[in-house]
């Protein structure tokens, strides 16, 4: 039943686009353009640096608090910035962090937009993937998907027009117990929400509207 729903949703033309921060995407585009203009190697290095920072934000609560705290003064943001940029070091042996990555976070800090960091990095990765002809499908489920189910979903997704235009299709399974059951599929710029949590929310909304 679930696979049938996913197949129907993927082939549907009426899928909604995921909400994205316009501000974050502006920074993503600027960084992508600057890195690509340098060289493919620079593009790859900037991506490695940004992903290293993204991982550090997930693993280090203090660093994440620094980035997401909107009450920090300009002085505090400036003094804490080196600790953030340092997380990008070591992505290449003997190579310093690129000026592009440094400039990005300096500008985000100056403009009070460090809170957009995660969105900027996600947007940048999407631009790089599109440039390379890659499509990443993220399947979020309440528990890890059995291998046979994920393989069948991957086969279904490969039949879509988006996947057929891509050079590479990568399927990632993320676990989030809050979805309760079912699936949420992020595919290119589309989101297919087949989760139980979504159905419960819709049901609750209907109840509220009828009261």
Image (cartoon, rainbow, N blue to C red):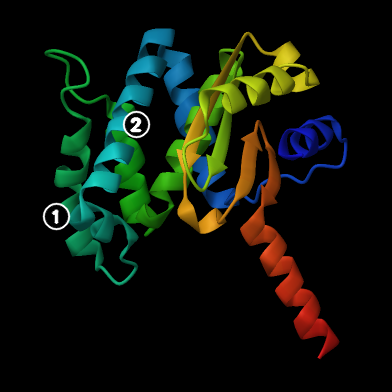
Q: Quadrant of residue 92?
A: top left
- Work out how far the residue at label 1 is from the one at label 2, CA to CA, in angstroms: 22 Å
The location of residue 137, given as percent across then percent down, is: 59, 29
Q: Secondary structure at mark 2?
A: helix
Mark 1 closeness class: few <14, some 14–19, many ≥20 residues within 10 Å: few
- Single out the residue that lies furthest toward the right: 13
Residue 79: give its label.
Answer: 1
Label 1 or label 2, whichever comes before in sequence order:
2
Quarter occupied by the N terminus: top right
Q: Out of 163 and 2, give the one closest to the viewer.
A: 2
Depicted 189 relative to depicted 204: above or below: above
The residue drawn where x is 73% and y is 33% is 3
The location of residue 47, given as percent across then percent down, is: 38, 24
The location of residue 139, given as percent across then percent down, is: 57, 36
The residue drawn where x is 19% and y is 36% is 87
The residue drawn where x is 47% and y is 17% is 36
Instruction: Confirm whether residue 100 shows in the render.
Output: yes
Instruction: Confirm whether residue 136 shows in the render.
Output: no
Which residue position holds label 2?
Answer: 51
Q: Out of 151 and 66, give the one closest to the viewer.
A: 151
Q: State left or right for residue 188 relative to residue 147.
A: right
């Amino acid at each position: 039943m679930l696979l049938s729903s996913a197949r129907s949703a993927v082939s549907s033309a009426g899928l909604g686009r995921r909400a994205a921060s316009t501000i974050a995407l502006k920074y993503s585009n600027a960084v992508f353009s600057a890195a690509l203009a340098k060289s493919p190697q620079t593009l790859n290095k900037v991506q490695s640096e940004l992903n290293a920072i993204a991982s550090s934000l997930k693993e280090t609560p203090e660093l994440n608090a620094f980035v997401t705290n909107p009450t920090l003064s300009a002085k505090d943001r400036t003094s804490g910035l080196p600790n953030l940029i340092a997380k990008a070091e070591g992505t290449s042996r003997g190579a310093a962090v690129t000026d592009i990555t440094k400039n990005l976070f300096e500008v985000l800090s100056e403009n009070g937009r460090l809170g957009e960091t995660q969105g900027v990095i996600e947007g940048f990765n999407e631009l790089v993937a599109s440039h390379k002809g890659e499509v990443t499908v993220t399947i979020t489920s309440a528990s890890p998907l059995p291998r046979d189910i994920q393989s069948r979903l991957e086969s279904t997704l490969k039949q879509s027009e988006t996947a057929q235009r891509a050079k590479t299709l990568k399927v990632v399974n993320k676990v989030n117990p809050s979805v309760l059951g079912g699936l949420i599929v992020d595919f290119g710029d589309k989101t297919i929400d087949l989760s139980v949590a979504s159905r419960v929310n819709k049901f609750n909304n209907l109840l509220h509207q009828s009261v």
